[in-house]
Amino acid sequence: MDKTKMIHGSERGHGGIKMTPAAVKILETASHLFYWKGINAVGVETIASEAGVTKKTLYDRFGSKDQLIVAYLAHRDEQWKTHLHQSLANVPANEPLHKILRIFDALGSWLAMNHQRGCAFINALAELTDESHPGRMLIFEEKKWLKQLFADWLTQAGVEEAEAKSEKLLILHEGGTVAYSMNLSTDVVTTLKETAMSIIGETEK
């Protein structure tokens, strides 16, 4: 598969950015540096140097560091959702509670795949203190999306108080990410799934 399509699913990235080979390399490099070193700690000069391009090329492709941050978060969102959908692929459509539990399995495998620094979105939110920054809305929407997914499947399963319980499941999901990144649990996925079933008020079948 064309690597540009692996980045954003098409030749156009977030905001209509043309994902040329140089743009792909810049985004890959920025994504690694932003996640592991922090958004504010990494400047465009470092990103350009590490990607093997000029600052002019970086600005030509993405326009600004802020837009590169948005592209990074959008790319991260797409990666997570692809991983989640693949994890859910073999769960029957008529088993919504199993789908909910599989989300926590997917989280465990995601974190094990070189994502030990925790949630990229929460990390980014802590650094993007300007409330008008376009990346913040993307972060909020990502969390709302997951909460709604929980709510939809709880409703489908006929669970009472689906909305309130979806909020608790989201908080559990985020807390599990923190526990894993800090090595505070010997088996975080099992703990998450057991707690999720307690929240739901059902016993796993």
Image (cartoon, grey):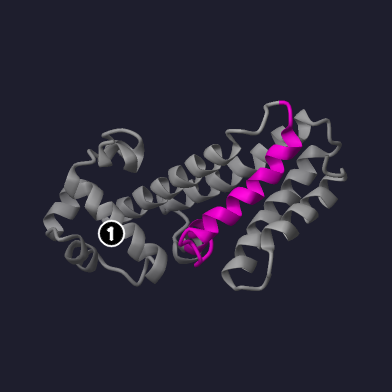
* Image quarter of residue 14: top left
Q: Which image quarter holds the N terminus?
A: top left
* Residue 174 quadrant: bottom right
Q: Main secondary structure of the magenta part?
A: helix
Q: Nearer the viewer, residue 12 or 157?
A: 157
Label 1 sits on a secondary structure element that is: helix
Q: How many marks?
A: 1
Residue 199 appears in the picture as rendered? yes
Residue 189 position, x and y percent, is 68, 57
Q: Which residues are magenta?
A: 94-123
**Kind of residue indicated by mark 1:** Thr
In the image, 91 versus 165, the foreground residue is 91
Give left or right: position of 170 versus 9: right
Q: Is residue 111 magenta?
A: yes
Which quadrant of the view contains residue 177?
bottom right
Q: Is residue 137 left or right of residue 197?
A: left
Q: Is residue 55 above or below residue 102?
A: below
Residue under numbered circle 1:
29
The magenta stretch spans residue 129: no
Q: Foreground residue, 191 or 9?
A: 191
Residue at 12%, 59% (x, y): give it.
54
State whether residue 14 appears in this view: no
Q: Position of residue 159 (x, y in %)?
A: 84, 35
Residue at 50% in and 50% down: 139
